[in-house]
Image: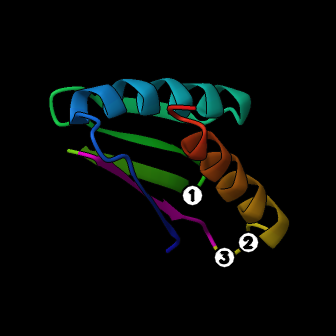
Amino acid sequence: MPRIQRKFPGRSAQEIYRRVDQVMEKIAGELSLDYRTDEHGRTGKVGRMGISGTYAVREGEVTVDLAYPMLVPGALRRKVEERIEEKLDGLFA
């Protein structure tokens, strides 16, 4: 299960959560994924047909875990991971 983690020193969990929530909502819309979020827990989940991802925000960092069924092509996996990494890298740019 791929894991993407980014640290944002000096940023609060709430500040990171707001930005990550916006990014994940946009990615979910682009890829037609279901999206659920828990603002109180600062977590979220996206998924559809066996593809799923969860994220959790803590002070200064976010962790995204992804899971794919065996039949998902490697190219699609890379596309999803690259898109998430790109968005997280530019979160506060």
Asked if the stretch drawn in magenta spans residue 24, the answer is no
Binning the other alpha carbons within 10 Å of mark 2 as few (below 14), some (14 to 19) or many (20 upward) gives few
Determine the residue positioned at 70% across, 47% down: 83
Query: In percent of the image, x 61 and y 25: which residue is there?
Result: 26
How far, Cα to Cα, is label 3 from label 2?
Answer: 4 Å
Q: CA distance from mark 1 to mark 2?
A: 10 Å
Q: Quadrant of residue 88?
A: top right
Q: Quadrant of the C terminus?
A: top right
Q: Which residue is mark 3?
A: 70
Left-right relation of 68 to 21: right
Upstream in sequence: badge 1 or badge 2: 1
Look at 55% across and 30% down and name the residue there.
23
Q: Is label 3 in contact with label 2 (beta carbons under 8 Å)?
A: yes
Of residues 92 and 27, the one nearer the viewer is 92
Residue type highlighted by circle 2: Leu
Report the amino acid beneath label 3: Met
**Residue under pointer 1:** 50
The amino acid pointed to by label 1 is: Gly
The magenta segment is 60-69
Residue behind mark 2 = 71
x and y percentages locating residue 27 in the rendered image: 63, 33
Give the secondary structure at mark 3.
Answer: loop
